Image (spheres, rainbow, N blue to C red):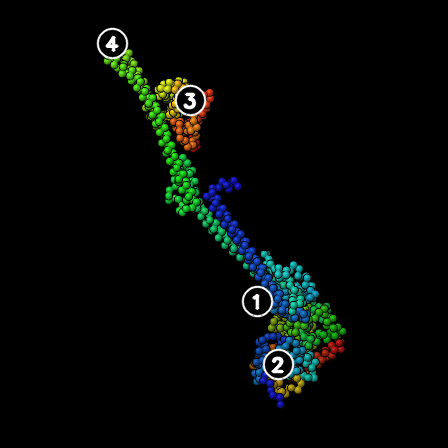
Amino acid sequence: MSAILRIPLSIRVPLLTALLMVALGVVASQQVLAALDRLQDARIREIARLHVETLSVALGPHVLRDDVWEVYDTLQRAAGEGEGRRMIFTAVADEDGRVIAATLPDRAPLDSSIAEISDGAQPPANLTVPSDEETLRLVAPLVYQGREVGQVVTELDVADLVAERRRAGRLLLLGNAVATGVLALLGYFLMRRMLRPITRLSQRMRDTSDQPEQVPETEIPRGDTELSRLVHTYNAMARTLVAKRDAERRLAERERFVSLGRLSSALAHEINNPLGGLLNAADTIREYADRPEVVRRSAELLTRGLNHLRDVSRAMLEQNRLDRSGAALSAEDFEDIHLLIGPEINRQAQRLSWKVEVTPTALEVLPAGPVRQSALNLLLNASAAAGRQGRVWFRVAPDRDHLHMMVADTGPGLSGSARTRLLSSGPVPPGGGVGLRLVHDLVEELGGVIQLDRRDGRTEIAVSLPLKGKEDPQC
Amino acid sequence: MRGAPRELRLGITPVFLDNDAEILTALRSALQEAAGQRVQFEQRRTYEEVTGMLLEGAIEAAWLCGYPFLQHRATLALMAVPLWHGKPMYQSYVIVREGDDAKSLADLRGGTHAFSDPNSNSGFLVTASDLALKGEKAEDFFRRTIFTYGHRNVVRAVADGLARSGSVDGYVWESLAALEPELAGRTRVVTRSEWLGFPPFCTRAGHLADPGVAALRKALLGLDRTEAGRHALGLLLLDGMTAGDVSLFDGIARRMRLLASLR
């Protein structure tokens, strides 16, 4: 049964159709053969009835008079004529069952008992054409002028009927086999043709599981059939799926820009704050140009400030550039993130506990872009959640197989919608949690898992990324 | 003076003549030609019927057997007696089926016997009188007797096994042996009787001078002198006709007396 179920529907249904055709052919043949049997039986009964009636009319008076010769002569003449040729042997007996005459006197001698040859003979009303024998023996009363005057036992030659039935059976079998074969083939190919859109659809679905492709108009079955509706529905689903992907992509882009936007205001302060000091240092240098120690001190201050500005701008450039490059993750990436989140932490007067314990080589298998974006988004969220003077934790520690990244905060915890964005692939509900869906998608792409925990007033988001390369879900 | 009938009616039976249309047509044509008158054959199944018709004047003449002729000797007259092998004589045979080892009539006791006609000399009287000579009656000697009303039928009955033995006209059996050897060959002659008077053509006594009867008699006696007559005689395997004499049938008369003595 399971072997049958393994056969594809596109073969199974046509095969079933062909099998049904064969079954139909077999049943039809049997019906026709049975009808032929009934017809032949009716015919032989009619022949037997006429035969007995004719003999009764011809023999009646002779049997009454016990006229042996006339009975014999009549039988001989009857045996030699027309339908009589069907008669192989006939014996006639008187009322007491003694043979008066037979067409073959040796088989039924005069005065012998008719019972000796009537054994196994059938009455005309019950006659059936045998399937394998070519003769039929029948016994019937000899009725003359309404009175039973004797008995007739007759053997009829039914070879022609048996042969006719065999011939009809053979022809029927052959004809039905051919017709059934043709119908079965026709049914098979028709069914295959009818199911072709489904075959194509399933093929298309299998081949383009990540990016569903619509069925071209030319391949859609004509008319408002179930199949055309199915294909139209599939096309609508494909269009919806593509639109959803596009929307999600746009959302991800937007979320990236949102996080960048939020960063940029903090970073503007980061750049703006030292600028006053740096301008002061420049003024000092101009004012005290003749005092070398003051100039040197101011120049050092200027250098430190400019260096910081350079680091900040570099980190921002990296953040944008790395999104598209395939650069490997390194410890410096976490330092960049530390630098980028610093101004936001300071602005909120928060305490950041930072602990990154990585060896440079351990991270190389991971791409820098997605990991940086994920870490930054989680930190921005934690910072936003923690609120003014809150606390934020960041831990990175690899083990043999995974890179474990943990972000915690003292905020009120994730809202339902934020939880959905971070933990599931379901539709994005409206409301809070900036960039969390992007984190979910990025981690999923990297084959990692996200766990959410809340205890002792702390919200902990743990991300584990496999270090053995991404586990390709398609393989 | 009795007016001549418009046609001459001749009674025949299948006892003697087979229903061979060719023979009857040839004989009829020959007689019509010679008699110059239309001849009508009246066929009946038994000698009794034909004899009855002749006696009551329904027919002018009949081809009878010597036995019925003698039974009505006082009222019948001989017209002509056929010549077979040049003699107006024939024999009666007792036959059995080929392969039956009976050697005499005595060996046939208890069997089924086929006679042709109870008024036939060769087909009944000879065997019955032979048995009478031994003090036996046919119906007791044989388990069963059947009448076939035809010498050819007797041969068929014996050949097919319907009857073990049969009494048959020797002339008919010999003719069948020549014309239908397949049929006669399936039988064997066990006994032959003495030579007896051949079945004659008869008319009512006192009517021999009737113009029609006289013309018919002349035609019969002159058959061997016309083309058509010889053709008919050829088909009948006969040589001709003779006027004959009642004494020809003395043998039959003797057997009649023998049979009567037993009854």
Chain assignment, label 2: B
Residue B85, given in percent of the width and then of the height, sits at 63, 78
Q: Which residue is mark 2?
A: B10
Location of mark 1 (residue)? A82
Vertical position of residue B12 compared to residue B156: above or below: below
Which residue has dot 3 on it? A411
Q: Is residue B124 above or below residue A214?
A: below
User: Where A213 falls versus B97 (above or below)?
Assistant: above
Give the distance between the C-alpha atoms of the residues marked 4 and 1, in whole angstroms: 155 Å
Label 3, secondary structure: give it: loop
- Which of disc 3 and disc 4 is earlier in sequence? 4
For label 4, the residue is A291
Q: In x, y percent, where is residue B204?
A: 66, 84
Of the residues shown, which amino acid type is indicated by label 4?
Arg
Depth check: A296 or A332 in front?
A: A296
Circle 4 or circle 2, nearest the eye? 4
Instruction: Judge whether residue B68 can be spotted in this image.
Output: yes
| Three-letter code for the amino acid on which mark 3 is drawn | Gly
